[in-house]
Image (spheres, rainbow, N blue to C red):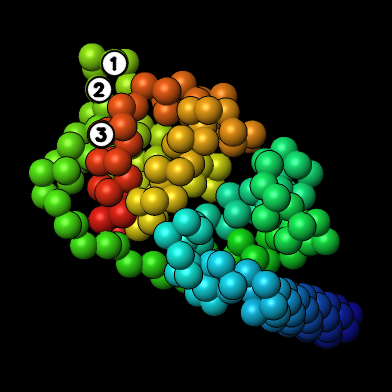
Amino acid sequence: MIVKKGVVMIRTVVRFAALGLMAVSASSWSGEAELKRAEEIVGGRCFLCHGLNGESASAVFPRLAGQHADYIARQLSDFKSGKRSSDTMKPQAEDLTPAEMKALGEYFQSKVVGPRRARDQELLAVGRYVFTRGNEFSGLPACSTCHGAQGLGTPQLPRLAGQHPRYIEDQLKQFNKRERTNDNAVMHTIASKLSELETHAVAEYIATLD
């Protein structure tokens, strides 16, 4: 009886081990399939504006390399639903499934974007001050409060580090005018308190973060 029970236990362990290997294998295959699909989508449409590695072909388009996967997926969903208004991005996102949005997020998050070298040290100092300390005289909070000391953000809040200054400035202006139709509740108040100099300076500083 003892031997028989031992054999049964061994068979049970082997069965569970086999199921575990099958699950790992299936998960690996699923991950590879999703990555391949993301590469197809990027190579078919995204690369024209954002580059194959999310480096962005122009300063008017955001760098996506290193951006949080969940944040990218949410923005794509907002473009698709119209919550975030964009004549350019809505048609690009309309036929994407939630799984494809997530895969695209993971794809771009895995890429690396480097910082830009500062060109004007005095302007950079103003930007650093605004980013890390805000402006107590106008009631402007520090950007680092939400986006982190290095501008790395969170899955809910965007990574800013290394972003094109022109894109940052454009988004801040859109928030101020309420032309950006999502994530506006907090950012409108913040953007409305920024002077033109502060907007330009903080955008230049953000570009130097890594």
Left/right of residue 18 with respect to residue 198 in the rendered view: right
Q: Which residue is mark 2?
A: 135
The CA span between labels 1 and 2 is: 6 Å
Question: Viewer-nearest of labels 3 and 2?
Answer: 3
Query: Whole-percent x and y of residue 111?
Result: 47, 71
Mark 1 lies on residue = 138
Q: Residue 90 at what x, y percent from top left? A: 73, 52
Q: Earlier in the sequence, mark 1 or mark 3?
A: 1
Give the amino acid at mark 1. Answer: Ser
Contact flag, marks 3 and 2 (Cβ < 8 Å): no
Question: Total of numbered circles in the picture?
Answer: 3
Disc assigned to residue 197? 3
Q: Tag 3, which secondary structure?
A: helix
Among the 4 quarters of the image, the one containing residue 129: top left
Q: Position of residue 48 (x, y in %)?
A: 59, 72
CB under 8 Å between callouts 1 and 2? Answer: yes
Q: Earlier in the sequence, mark 3 or mark 2?
A: 2
